Amino acid sequence: MSEIAARLIAITPAEMAAVVTQHPNVIIDVWGENCAPCKALRGLLLNDAIPELLVYECFSLKADNHTDWVKMHHIRQLPTLFLYQDGELVNRQSGIISAGQLQLFLNQNRDTRDDLRLFLESELAAGKLDNVEQALAAMNERERRHPEFARIQSHLHLLNTPLPHPDNELVSRVMQALREADWAWLANTLADVIATQAKQADALLHKDVAESLHDTKHWFIAMINAMPDRSKAQQWRRWLSSFSNME
């Protein structure tokens, strides 16, 4: 195999069987040398505008070099996409393919939401925050508001938000509780920390304390958004918004 790009690798018909069995989600792009729609599709496959592609391995097969194979598979129009899932051919499409049509092509046979969620969660765990942020940015607002992706956004916000007390043992304890899903402890801690800092801000009226309160609130809002109990999370958000310094 010769690598065309990090996400699109050239293969031959003889290599297809191994490719589709080695990866759970595979796209094979059959293209032609002097084919404008093929070049447009290749641009879609190589960019980051379609988050669903993150869970697929993409391969390229040049039709000009394998005309007998093309005839055997009744390919009459280029480009032609083959989509394999778990070793089985589940869809194919030929002709001009727009970004919207490609998304529909990827999603119409099996909801790839779980695959994408698992991928983003693994990227978060690996500390690859830029990859997660880029994938979320490529989604439309309706997709980002889905509870699973909204929670990932909250985790990303949590990791990107400056911590109020970097040297405080509380920080490591909260992160441990998040990993262990100890939501009861987190909720109680949230009440204690916010209430304590609110009293300090009211009593001292000190700029540094007020800024610390602001950062702490946004940090814990991200934590609240990650709670699985959505009704309780909404209660905590209302409680937090009652503070006068809340933006």
Image (spheres, grey):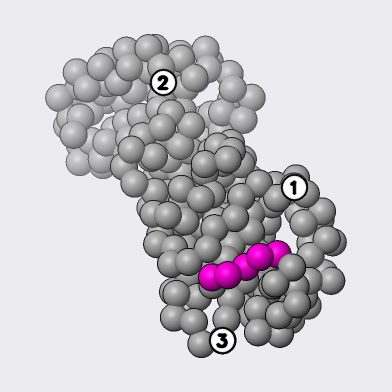
Image quadrant holding the N terminus, namely bottom right
Foreground: disc 2 or disc 1: 1
- In this figure, which residue is indicated by the disc labeled 3? 33
Instruction: Confirm whether the magenta stretch covers residue 74.
Output: yes
- Residue located at (64% from left, 54% from top): 83
Neighbour class for label 1 at 10 Å: few (<14), some, many (≥20)?
Answer: few
- Residue located at (44% from left, 81% from top): 36
Give how far across and how far down residue 54 sits, in percent. 57, 55
From mark 3 to mark 1, how far is it between C-alphas? Answer: 28 Å
Neighbour class for label 2 at 10 Å: few (<14), some, many (≥20)?
Answer: many
Disc 2 marks which amino acid?
Leu
- 149 displayed left or right of 82: left
- Magenta residues span 73-77
> Judging from the image, what secondary structure is the residue with disc 3 in?
loop
In terms of depth relative to the viewer, which is nearer, 94 or 61?
A: 94
Neighbour class for label 3 at 10 Å: few (<14), some, many (≥20)?
Answer: few
What label does residue 190 carry, if any? Answer: 2
Residue 19 falls in image quadrant: bottom right
Asked whether residue 138 appears in the rendered view, the answer is no
Disc 1 marks which amino acid?
Glu
